[in-house]
Amino acid sequence: MVEIPGGTFTMGTDEYPDAQPKHTVTVKGFLMDEHEVTNAEFARFVKATGYKTVAERPLDPADYPGVPIDKLVAGSAVFTPPTENVGLDNHLQWWDYVAGANWQHPKGPTSNIKGHENEPVVQVCYEDALAYAKWAGKRLPTEAEWEFAARGGKTATKYYWGNVLKPNNKWFANIFQGNFPSGNTLEDGFNDVAPVKSFPKNPYGLYDMDGNVWEWCSDLYRPNYYKNSPKVNPKGPSSSYDPEEPNVVKHVQRGGSFLCSDQYCIRYIAGSRGKGETSSASNNLGFRCVKDKN
């Protein structure tokens, strides 16, 4: 973990309605994992506790009324790029529910994490991330802590690394290049998840605060939370609400992933927010932990 000093910063961005208004926030100092939790680290947790992630557990028919029993198979969401150009108005064109997909088999039962021990663990939902954090004697970051750490003490810039997408013609984050979602040019060298520390660290010594995998935060999600957010150590609203899915409980996610591009989901822009159903997982979603200073 690295030490993140306390301080005051301008949180949010004018780029997205749910990240407005930009507002002044003060956070106290804390410790933060220098990179996302890796497959190797999560494996140690599972070995020590016998923990089963949500994606590995049998589905309860009571939660899926009307769905045939033979269709209730444990699994998770996997990015499956189409073979031809498609419109960007329906994400189901590139996301599939794959039976048997979980953290040990990120893309389905024929995949595994052998040789990928140093990559971020994926296919973990909020409950899984929280369980690991508690086992490790840590916690998940608030989104204010996360953004403060990602900014690295810099004044406001468009991206966390600066105002230019490719400084000196170099990529500073693992994001999608090319024609999303079918034409990844692999310009940054990675088709999907990259090993941790593949890109430069920020001024606080943190890696991959942009791209690679989305990261869970402890805050529940509300698109208008910033209008009345506390000025000191905000921890998110007391309940979740997303007008796009009003009956779904969601938590904030931050940082974007290897699927974010300048064509779609440009959520690697500094101050932007993501969101995810609390029980959802995918192969572009992970987490890192923080810890209070003694």
Image: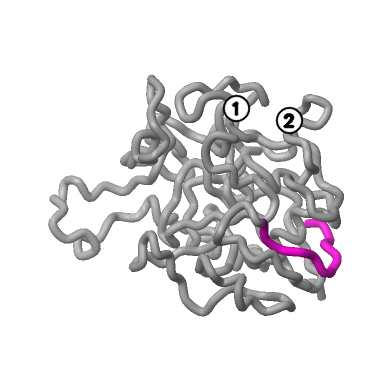
Q: Nearer the viewer, residue 52 or 94?
A: 94
Q: How far, Cα to Cα, is label 1 from label 2?
A: 10 Å
Q: Residues within 10 Å of mark 2 (few under 14, many from 20)?
A: some
- Span of residues in magenta: 1-13
Question: Residue at position x 47%, y 76% from top?
Answer: 239
Q: Which residue is mark 1?
A: 177
Q: Is residue 157 visible?
A: yes
Question: Would you say residue 195 sits in the magenta stretch?
Answer: no
Q: Pointer 1 and pointer 2: residues touching (CB < 8 Å)?
A: yes
Q: Position of residue 79 (x, y in %)?
A: 43, 35
Question: Would you say residue 12 sits in the magenta stretch?
Answer: yes
Quadrant for the C terminus, please. bottom right
Q: Position of residue 41 (x, y in %)?
A: 63, 49
- State whether the magenta stretch is mostly helix, strand or loop: strand
Q: Position of residue 117 (x, y in %)?
A: 61, 38
Question: Residue at position x 56%, y 45% from top?
Answer: 121
Picture disc at residue 171: 2
Report the amino acid beneath label 2: Trp
Which colour scheme appears in the figure? one colour
Q: Nearer the viewer, residue 91 or 70?
A: 91
Picture disc at residue 139: none
Q: Secondary structure at mark 2?
A: loop
